[in-house]
Amino acid sequence: MPPRPRSRTETRQLVTIAGIELELVERRVKRLSLRVSPPDGRVRLTVPHGTPGSLIRSTVAERAAWIARHQQRFRALPQPHAARYETGETHYYAGEPYRLELRPGAPRRVTLEGRRLVMGVGPACDAAARERRLERWYRERLQESLPPLVERWAARLEVPVPHVGVKRMKTRWGSCNPRAARVWFALALARRRPELVAYIVVHEVAHLLVPDHGPRFKALMSRHVPRWRELDAELDAWPLWAPLPAGADLRAP
């Protein structure tokens, strides 16, 4: 497949190297970066412009076993359910299941009523629009709950309060840019229970002090969140991309 230009400084193509199909991305970067992404184990190799083909091939061949392990792990995890955002579906908020109820003619917003997520809809509100409406509600909830948590932990860790953002993420629960004093959190956190959200807040704010995941960072986490390894394992058991935990059914009983 010939390179497909994405911008003046980037090209992409699908290639097969050492029996592994991957997306090869050439862009303005300083070093090679290899990533296996959930949920299906897609492989992407990002390289600087002009990287020799021999180096690309050797990199993939040397990491073939690593790639296979990650693909196997991702494929063994629960795969995403296809939500249609219809009455009767189960959707999670703050770690708890709620039955979605579409209410024609009601105000076009999402509200919690007991164990129901009630969404007002109009006649032209299709599945894509309903998904956007629910995601907007999730985003608003996180935008309310995250800043006070971040402020509290910034004070405890004695760092300046960073800017807080929420966005869709495919592979990470959060990210931190210490230079810009900015932390981002995955929209999917709105579905997870509050203790897990708080753990991710501590994790990202701690990166303002320690940018890597080395021994100093782990010691910092152990001091402030002694159960962080258990919480990390719980997040792994319900993957970022899955709207429901393993074994759960979209249809309410």
Image (cartoon, rainbow, N blue to C red):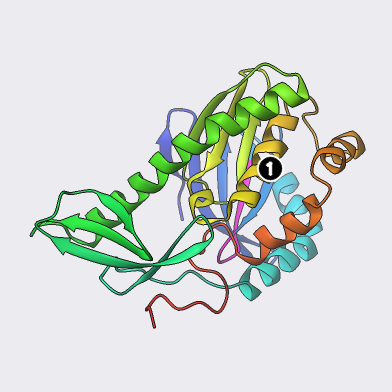
Question: What x and y, as percent, mark residue 70?
Answer: 71, 64
Q: If the image is split into quadrants, where does the C terminus sit? A: bottom left
Pointer 1: residues within 10 angstroms few (<14), some, or many (20+)?
A: few
Q: Is residue 45 magenta?
A: yes
Task: For residue 49, say whether it is visible.
Answer: no
> Can residue 139 be seen here?
yes
Does residue 226 lie above or below 233 as drawn? Answer: above
> What is the span of residues highlighted in magenta in the rendered image?
38-46
Residue at point 49%, 29% (across, down)? 9
Indicate whether residue 148 is drawn in magenta: no
Residue, disc 1? 33
**Residue at the spot 62% in from the left edge and 72% down from the top edge:** 75
Residue 213 x/y as whole percent: 81, 39
- Identify the residue at the far front of this view: 114
> What percent of the width, then of the height, locates residue 121?
16, 57
63 or 5: nearer the eye? 63
Q: Position of residue 67 (x, y in %)?
A: 72, 62
Q: Quadrant of residue 185?
A: top right
Q: Is residue 175 above or below residue 74?
A: above
Identify the residue shown where x is 55% and y is 79%: 247
Q: Secondary structure at mark 1?
A: strand
Q: Is residue 145 toward the left or the right of residue 120 in the image?
A: right
Residue lying furthest bottom in this view?
A: 253
Nearer to the camera, 152 or 14: 152
Instruction: Give the residue type at disc 1.
Output: Ser
Which residue: 61% across, 18% down? 180
| Vertical comparison of 36 with 83: above or below | above
Q: How many marks?
A: 1
